[in-house]
Amino acid sequence: MSAREPQLETPEEARERLQAEAHLSAVERDRLWRRIEYGAARGGPRTRLSRPLLWAPALAAAAATLAILLLGDEAPPTPQASTPDPCTLDARRAQLELPAHCAPQTLQMNGDEWRVEASTRVEREPEGARVVSGRVRFRVAPRPGAARFRVRVSHGQVVVIGTVFRVEQRTEGGSVHVSEGVIEFVWSDGQRERVSAGGTLSWPRETEPETEAESESEAEAESETETEPEVDMDRVIGRLLQLRSQRRHDEAARLLRETLRAPGLTRRQRERISYELGLTLEASGASACAHWRRHHARFGAGLHAAELDARLERCNAP
Amino acid sequence: MTSKGDGLPVLEAAYREHSDYVFGVCLKFAGGDRDWALDRTHDVFIRLHDNLRSLETDSDLRPWLRRVAVNECLMDLRKRDRRTRLLRLFGRGLEPQQAAAPPGSERQVALRRDRAHLDVAVAALPAQQRVLLGLMYFEGETLTEAARLIGVSKGQASKLHRRALEALGTREWEGKA
């Protein structure tokens, strides 16, 4: 700041400038009134349009369009009325479409980050987004309480618990790849699957949800425990993310070990927790080779085959 | 005075008369973010609607609107401060020079002619300091009145003012306090 000190406006200059700018255009005034009118007509709790009502930009855009139509030639030219650059996405719009010839765009959406690649169409939704086609990488900030960011795709939705992931939607199917944290994919039929860091889930399903390798009794037991889990996985994952972000890796590893010992977990849950434990041990700087070998012995290649192979290879290297 | 349902005409009349004024107040704390000022203006008029029954709409609404506008801006900025701290906690913080700025922080480097915008520089301050400086330097309030409006003692406001000027790296306006 000090380097810019000689160039800073004086308060008087700033006041004059702000006074000149403190004038609503006809379109702004009309658009804002429609928002207020809507909020007032709803009654009850005050309407906060900045964050919870993510569809507000759509309403505002519609109101602006209506205002422009109603005002016709009398409306003064405004940035909203000019032809937008198709390669510059407006984060306030409900529908975002980036043509094929454009460079990827990174948008800040109420604390979240959306990196939209070319040939992508994505829509804002009250609880998150819908990827209609193309590829978007989301970096989602943790939500308070039970609120969850959701991304709808053709075969279900991604439920996020504070994480970084990339969603790709093609004509017939798509995939989600998780870079950090954990997501839960809720299939259209209600089945749920968790995907943790390094994992990828594709749709539509290529196989039945239950693997043949699992015994019937095990599958039955899992089905029972999935309906009445004894461990609050959301809480565990939330706490894990918090501890990791604070680099409290020892506590994170302890949490995961305790969770692994808890009864009522499915085999898949155990495998994923064990995988997360390996990542946590690595992050703490400790050698995780012994853990990866135990993990492999217990779960086989499993859900994280490629990542596990790479790690075991490194461990076995001379 | 009126029920919420039939208060809309009164609200609309107040909006037509005072929207520029309220927007102008909010803009002084907006750090160059016009959309943010529009959102706060919205909040102020929703608050007005919620309070139509208890307000004398025949009297001058501006003092009430101004007080509410300052409160709304301060509350939102505080919320943003908390959120920035939380994001940092999760390792998702913005770069230091961006962290304290509001959305639209690309405007932080906005320059007109060869001058850096003072309100944009002020936007990098914590909520109370930002609103205090806005009130004192853009709204022309005294330290005492600004302290009253943001709900702190004069001594506390003086400290906030000193810290804000230190953060801005300038002391050339200290005599105004």
Image: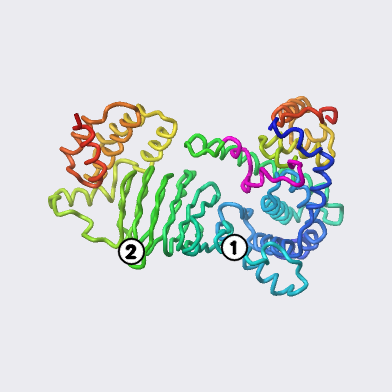
**Dot 2 surroundings within 10 Å: few (below 14), some, or many (20 or more)?**
some
The residue under label 2 is A173
Residue A233 on image: x %, y %: 34, 42
Range shown magenta: B96-117
Q: Position of residue B137 (x, y in %)?
A: 81, 38
Quarter the C terminus of chain A occupies: top left
Relative to A31, is B146 on the left or the right? right
Q: Earlier in the sequence, mark 2 or mark 1?
A: 1
Do callouts 2 and 1 point to residues on the same chain?
yes
Which part of the image, by quadrant, shows the N terminus of chain A? top right
Q: Nearer the viewer, residue A239 or B23?
A: B23
Q: Chain of mark 2?
A: A
Residue A72 in sight in this render: yes
| Distance from Cα at disc 2 to Cα at disc 1 | 30 Å
Left/right of residue A245 with respect to residue A91 in the rendered view: left
Question: Disc 2 marks which amino acid?
Answer: Gly
The kind of residue on which mark 1 rests is Asp
Q: Which x, y percent locates residue A281?
A: 31, 30
Q: Residue at x 31, y 40 (%)?
A: A231
Residue B105 drawn at (x, y percent): 63, 45
Above or below residue B63? Residue B164 is above
Q: Quadrant of residue A26?
A: bottom right
Tag 1: Cα neighbours inside 10 Å, few (<14), some, or many (≥20)? Answer: few
SS of the residue at dot 1? loop
- Mark 2 or 1: in front is 1
Instruction: Please tell me whether residue A142 is drawn above or below residue A52 in the rendered image.
Output: above
Q: Which mark is residue A85?
A: 1
